[in-house]
């Protein structure tokens, strides 16, 4: 296989579905049983086009925390997205890709002082706050920063709620604007987050209305309130297109009512799972199994052990409240049993699901998990020294030809303080393995066609 070193992108002659691609990979690499992700780069591109079509006034700033895979970041940067960063490390990762600092919002209301200092050195001047102590910290470290006041929202219908930790209510927001004016800081707008995986469009409508009220108060105080950040919470799993369209329609209507085009306010959002959830499909291998008899019911139950678990890719079960659904790679008939699926570590907590219905499967069979792109890789660790799934990217050549410049080798010059650095990105170093897949000529990415 001809691949960029540490960046295995497979270019296919025709479009592939993820499961189809996994079958092909398993067929050609029969001896390789390590877990892996099949990452559909075209899905990322399609999501971006859908966003721009559905909410043309709202510029997406991808939430790096959701999945900080460098390949995805390069693609989104090429497509023109901005970035929501929550730490020094995330800011550095985006700056190192050659993205200009004005495409980054430092969207963490409670920041370490040294991280604020780094943002200053990197030229990232737009950042959020929601409390008085944060204002005082920024006044001391970065008084020229452009501040965005984060307000509280009703996120009771979200998968992951944030308002118990972040956001100022109406009274506090007024006080903070007054305080910022008193100490001569520049507040340029308002942000909110309706919770990750928000299930209702009304939460966005109400938050936009509240943001208008607070921004009007800021304007009265003499601030130039020119930025509205509507946060994240947009669905990205397979089959959620209708739900996304409903949210987008409600957002557009609320924006037209409270922030008409002629008001001149710039509008951004912080989608994360929207972009990556459905693009990642995880393939795991069964490494052990056993049969158990339920002492209470005499029911036969099966236990399967796979080579990725809750310390790795399935940390989303613990942290993101995700309920993954297993799919068999092979069509297998026969009686089905209540089955539990466990990860490979020595910890009894490492259980992926307890209620799957599966037939008897041999060790070595593959189990596939869809919609595994959000809050999986970014939170995974190698507990017990066991690696989690690594990405293998695929994209049809017709699409690749339009986006391959995202992965071109280039020299990037950027400034950190007064230190000038040159950074060579995505060098075309290739690993040459003998695989029965056809090579093709490409000046950017020597890859393969299947």
Image: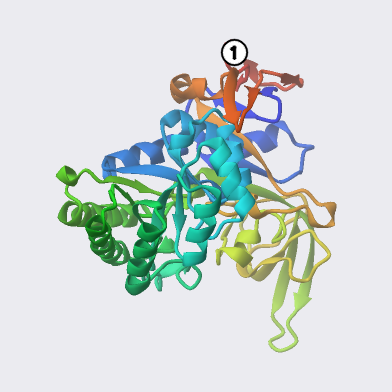
Residue 364 higher or lower than 25, as above or below: below
Residue 315, quarter of the rendered image: bottom right
Q: Which residue is mark 1?
A: 440
Q: Which quadrant: the N terminus?
A: top right
Q: Is residue 42 left or right of residue 341?
A: left
Residue 175 higher or lower than 66, as above or below: below
**Nearer-the-camera pick, 262 or 123:** 123
Residue 68 shows up from this direction:
no
**Nearer-the-camera pick, 24 or 374:** 374
**Residue at the spot x=42%, y=31% of the render?**
79
The x, y position of residue 279, in whole percent, is 51, 43
Residue 352, quarter of the rendered image: bottom right
**Nearer-the-camera pick, 92 or 170:** 170
Q: Residue furthest bottom?
A: 296
The image's colour scheme reads rainbow
The x, y position of residue 423, in whole percent, is 65, 23
Residue 122, quarter of the rendered image: top right
* Label total for image: 1
Q: Is residue 216 left or right of residue 193?
A: left
The x, y position of residue 132, in whole percent, is 47, 66
Residue 410 higher or lower than 162, as above or below: above
Q: Which quadrant: the C terminus?
A: top right
Residue 122 higher or lower than 273, as above or below: above
**Residue at the spot x=71%, y=46% of the render?**
35
């Amino acid at each position: 296989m001809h691949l960029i070193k540490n960046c295995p992108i497979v270019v296919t002659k025709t479009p592939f579905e993820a499961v189809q691609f996994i079958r092909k990979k398993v067929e050609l690499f029969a001896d390789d049983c390590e877990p892996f992700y099949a990452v559909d780069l075209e899905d990322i591109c399609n999501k971006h086009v859908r966003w721009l079509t559905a909410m043309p006034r709202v510029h997406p700033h991808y939430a790096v925390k959701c999945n900080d895979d460098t390949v995805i970041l390069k693609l989104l940067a090429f497509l023109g997205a901005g970035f929501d960063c929550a730490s020094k490390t995330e800011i550095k990762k985006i700056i190192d890709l050659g993205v200009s600092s004005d495409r980054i919002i430092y969207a963490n209301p409670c920041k370490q002082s040294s991280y604020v200092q780094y943002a200053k050195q990197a030229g990232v001047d737009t950042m959020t706050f929601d409390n008085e102590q944060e204002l005082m910290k920024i006044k001391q470290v970065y008084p020229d920063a452009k501040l965005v006041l984060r307000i509280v929202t009703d996120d009771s219908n979200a998968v992951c709620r944030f308002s118990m930790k972040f956001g100022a209510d109406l009274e506090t927001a007024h006080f903070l604007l007054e305080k910022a004016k008193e100490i001569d800081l520049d507040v340029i707008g308002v942000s909110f987050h309706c919770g990750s995986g928000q299930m209702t469009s009304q939460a966005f409508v109400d938050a936009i209305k509240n943001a208008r009220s607070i921004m009007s108060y800021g304007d009265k105080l003499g601030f130039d309130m020119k930025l509205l950040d509507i946060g994240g919470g947009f669905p990205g799993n397979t089959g959620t297109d209708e739900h996304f369209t409903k949210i987008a329609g409600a957002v557009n209507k609320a924006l037209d009512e409270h922030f008409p085009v002629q008001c001149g306010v710039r509008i951004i959002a912080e989608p994360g799972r929207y972009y990556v959830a459905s693009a990642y499909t995880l393939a795991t291998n069964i490494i052990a199994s056993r049969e158990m008899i339920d002492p209470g019911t005499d029911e036969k139950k099966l236990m399967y052990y796979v080579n990725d678990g809750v310390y790795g890719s399935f940390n989303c079960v613990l942290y993101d409240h995700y309920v993954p659904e297993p799919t068999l790679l092979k069509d297998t008939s026969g009686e089905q049993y209540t089955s539990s699926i466990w990860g490979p570590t020595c910890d009894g907590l490492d259980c992926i699901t307890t209620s799957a219905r599966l037939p008897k499967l041999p060790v070595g069979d593959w189990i596939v998990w869809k919609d595994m792109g959000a809050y999986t890789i970014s939170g995974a660790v190698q507990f017990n020294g066991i690696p989690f799934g690594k990405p293998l990217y695929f994209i049809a050549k017709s699409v690749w030809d339009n986006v391959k410049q995202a992965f071109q080798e280039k020299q990037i010059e950027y400034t950190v303080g007064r230190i000038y650095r040159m950074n060579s990105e995505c060098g075309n170093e290739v690993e040459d393995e003998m695989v029965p897949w056809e090579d093709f000529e490409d000046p950017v990415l020597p890859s393969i066609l299947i």
